[in-house]
Amino acid sequence: RDASVRGSRREDVQAARARLVAAQARRDQAAATLASRFVDAPLAGELLQSKFRVGEYYQPGGAEPLVVMGDTRTLHVRVDVDERDVARIGLGARAILRVPAMPGRDLVGEVVEIGRRMGRKNLRTNDTKILEVVVKIAEPAGLVVGQRGMVYIAAK
């Protein structure tokens, strides 16, 4: 008689189940191999720089990071303040950022951090000592990370 009429033999069913289990194991192994080829960021952000190209080998735990990422929804500007002006700077002070790439546009911000230690002379200026101040920009649209500009901070 026909196998469809009399039904499958027990050995055929067991062999089919064994093939299914083996196929599922190969699928799971392929998924694990694929997952090991990806690097997940611990936080959401924007990719700012990639240090490696597709196909290059990366040694886990190496000194060089694979990528540089950052949260660009909020941008902070680091400002070198001359030691003569340090006493006139305060937290919450209003600041204006002007960048050459955006002539005529003033970007508003506020001082959110003041360094606790004077630093060395900056090569770009003739200051004897400088203090680093961090300004949070309210609406950073159009700014690029690493862009240079001039910051004007209101005296307290």
Image (cartoon, grey):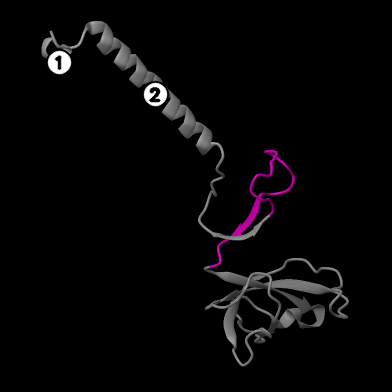
In the visual, does 26 lie left or right of 106? left
Instruction: Determine whether the residue tagged by mark 2 lies in a helix, strand or loop.
Output: helix
Which is the main secondary structure of the residues drawn in magenta?
loop
Residue closest to the eye, 115 or 150: 150
Q: Residues within 10 Å of mark 2 (few under 14, many from 20)?
A: few
In this rendering, would 115 be left or right of 36?
right
Which is more toward the observer, 49 or 15?
15
* Extreme residue toward the front, this view: 1
Residue at 69% across, 41% down: 57
Which percent across, then down, holds residue 100? 69, 85
Magenta segment includes 15? no
Identify the residue position indicated by label 2 in the image. 23
Mark 1 to mark 2 CA distance (whole Å): 25 Å
Residue 55 among those drawn in magenta: yes
Residue at x 39% of width, y 23% of height: 23
Q: Nearer the viewer, residue 144 or 35?
A: 35
Looking at the rendering, the stretch of residues picked out in magenta corresponds to 51-72
Question: Label 1: how many residues lie within 10 Å, few (<14), some (14-19) or many (20+)?
Answer: few
As helix, strand or loop, the secondary structure at mark 1 comes to: helix
* Mark 1 touches mark 2? (CB < 8 Å): no
Instruction: Report x, y in % for residue 46.
Output: 55, 61
Task: State which quarter of the image contains the N terminus.
Answer: top left
According to the image, label 1 marks what residue?
4
